Amino acid sequence: MNRFLFQAAVAALFFAAIMTLQGCGGGGGDSSPAPAAPTQAAPGGTTSSGTTSTGSTGSTSTNVSVGGTTGNSSTGANDAGGLPIPNCTPKQVIVSLLGDSNMSQMFLQGELQKDLDAHFGPNAAIVHNYAMAGDQSNSALYITGDVILENYGAADMMAGIDPAVYKHNIMSMRATLVVTQMPVNSELYDPTPYLAAAKSIGLPVADAYTYMLGMVGASTVIDAVTGLPRPTTLVDLEPDTIHPTNSVDNEITDNVIAPEVFKQVAPLRCLLS
């Protein structure tokens, strides 16, 4: 009997020792620390645990270099009326000119560039003059530009080019604004068929022709075929009786051409987002 009790006591002690070892993490437990959450690279070059960042402030902004300056999206451009455009990143607009001597002479004065600088700010829009004396609509250069003005007609008229061909040539130029030809103080030429053709294209028109006929001292007669006014007397012409004086060129630019150019430049002042 005593022997049986002794064996039972030894078994109990052995079982207790095993349980004590398991409770201390031996054998079946895992005492290693839990793995850390993975880190993720942030766009700004730093790292964060489980999140991303976009720079130190958490916000983004876009600056665009325009003509050597940096334009911010909150400043920098005016509309056609000269008022600031909100949330606009400025874009430099290219205004290209095509035409004969009337156009080339008119813009030698730089009046349109002055008007654009005064209205939109310096270098907001840049004028490129491709007009050449004696040029006709069938010899126009293929040019690029955001706004393209054409002022053909006088040389076409003097060369006897068919007004229908003249109209077709104008429509092929990618022009965005028609500047009507200057009237010629001569009974040898009838400008009204070319004027009618230019106005029938459907493009916006800066009507320099009509402005000159309305100047003090000018007189006109209505053409029997086209129903449009023809000049009988013009004022402020150069001695060649074909080209307006520089002062008249500037007056036409300020009062007729520039306002129409402003309308086309203003919507192009902001970069598309």
Image (cartoon, helix red, strand yellow):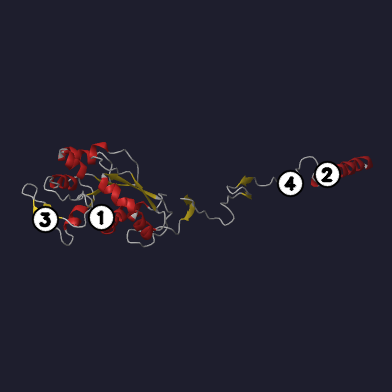
The answer for how far apart the CA atoms under marks 4 and 2 are is 20 Å
* First in residue order: circle 4 vs circle 2: 2
* First in residue order: circle 3 vs circle 1: 3
Residue 169 lies, in percent from the top left, at 22, 38
Tell me the residue that label 3 is attached to: 220
Tell me the residue that label 1 is attached to: 245
Residue 46 lies, in percent from the top left, at 63, 49
* First in residue order: circle 2 vs circle 1: 2
In the rendered structure, the answer to whether residue 225 lies left or right of residue 201 reads left
Tell me the residue that label 4 is attached to: 33
Helix, strand or loop under label 4: loop
The number of numbered badges drawn on the structure is 4
Tell me the residue that label 2 is attached to: 21
Mark 3 and 4 residues: CB-CB less than 8 Å, in contact? no
Q: Residue at x 35, y 56 (%)?
A: 116
Q: Is residue 93 visible?
A: yes
The answer for how far apart the CA atoms under marks 3 and 2 are is 120 Å
Q: Amino acid at mark 2?
A: Leu
Task: Nearest to the eye among marks 2 and 1: give it.
Answer: 1
The answer for how far apart the CA atoms under marks 2 and 1 are is 112 Å
Task: Nearest to the eye among marks 4 and 2: give it.
Answer: 4
Callout 1 environment at 10 Å: few (<14), some (14 to 19), or many (20+)? some
* Image position of 86 with respect to 155: above or below: below
Residue 222 lies, in percent from the top left, at 8, 53
Residue 247 lies, in percent from the top left, at 27, 58
Q: Residue at x 81, y 45 (%)?
A: 19
* First in residue order: circle 3 vs circle 2: 2
Q: Amino acid at mark 4?
A: Pro
In the rendered structure, the answer to whether residue 41 lies left or right of residue 131 reads right
Q: Amino acid at mark 1?
A: Thr
